[in-house]
Amino acid sequence: MTPPTLQIELRNHTRSSKVFAYITGRDLTNDNAWFLLSSDGQTAYHPTSPATILQPLTQDCSISLEKDSSRTVTIPRIAGGRIWFSIDVPLVFLLNPGPTLVEPSVTNPSDPNYNTTWHFCEFTFNEAQLFANISYVDFVCLPIALMVRNARGECLRVEGHGSDGLEKVAEGLERQHASDGAGWDELVVRQQQGKKVLRVLSPNNAIVLKPELLSGYWDAYINEVWEKYRDQSLTVNTQAAAGQVEGRVVQDHLEFAAGRFAKPSARDVFGCSSGPFTPAGGPDVLAIIPRLAAAVNRSTLHSHDFQPNGDAVGAYYGHEVTNHYARVVHEVNLDGRGYAFPYDDVVPDGGRDVAGTLFDGEPVLFTVTVGGGGGRD
């Protein structure tokens, strides 16, 4: 069992002397109430329900970090936790009746944080373990690195991207657009004067702002896959109780004994939660969905008929039609790891993690560094 509280060291390795950190989540010790850590780094703030929407917090929850400084804070057990960082200006969190915490958004241009430089990592700290990852499922912005030191004296790390990682991701997607004309450059969001890169959106978030972006992108690839499995079986290792299951295309649906899958659209592929990838059905279907979605995003479904065990990391993103956002994100990260799309945590049995996850049942110190350098001193 983990200790009842966790120490988190927050480090500022950016060039800014004004970095603001925030910790949010659901307090497992207080009926899953919304939790924010107060600015003193010790006191829990559980907001109450306001009478009307979009009301300000009633407590200061910004933890300030000077340049080349660190602060160690303490949290209780939390589910759905996020550690947020912003540069130069604080973030604005608001409350709706419930209460519901209104978090910063990159898909709402009227959000008060839209033109602020910010990012987050995700974690859950419960009785069993600390689990954390760097999430690029929504966008890329600040470089964040993670390190967990456990009671055995071991240090587990995820290095994130370097201080110039955002620019490298933007350049990689602009080169890809120059090559295929698909619109990858439109994932790049620049500051109002149009020069400096503010963030790079993931395809599923960019499509929220520009619904026609990348429309039809996967059609030819999906048609190729469907034709292949019309004549031969696809084996999916569910890595669950169902074990290995086989499917074939019948009347334009990929059919397994547990369920059938229609052809996914580009929005379905990038989001992994709609159309045939809607998380619904029995446990066998719920185990098949992530493995199909990952295989399409990595464009290995056409070349490997045993998913995910037939894959190797080196084979990911090898087809000209692939999730180039995920490809570039992994290439730019210092250790090649990071959560670039939903289900990026799908790996072959015994395979190497590429999602940048950390988990440990005996955490002593969780260090989160913003600014690059892989979080190393």
Image: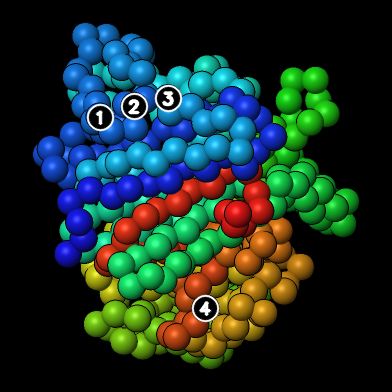
Query: Residue at label 3?
Result: 62
Residue at image position (60%, 54%) is: 377
**Closer mark to the observer between disc 1 and disc 4:** 1
Give the amino acid at mark 1. Thr
Q: Are marks 1 and 4 in contact (CB under 8 Å)?
A: no
Q: Label 4 crowding class (10 Å Cα cut-off): few <14, some 14-19, many 20+?
A: few
Give the amino acid at mark 4. Arg
Instruction: Looking at the picture, tell me which residue is in the foreground, 320 or 275.
Output: 320
Query: Residue at label 4?
Result: 352
Instruction: Using the image, tell me which numbered label, if any, was put on residue 106.
Output: none
Query: Residue at label 2?
Result: 40
Instruction: Using the image, tell me which numbered label, if any, was put on residue 43.
Output: 1
Image location of residue 352, percent across then percent down: 52, 78
Tell me if residue 246 comes above or below residue 97 in the rendering: below
Q: Are marks 2 and 1 in contact (CB under 8 Å)?
A: yes
Q: Secondary structure at mark 2?
A: loop
Going from N to C along the chain, the mark reached first, 4 or 2, is 2
The N terminus sits in image quarter = bottom left
Image location of residue 150, percent across then percent down: 35, 65
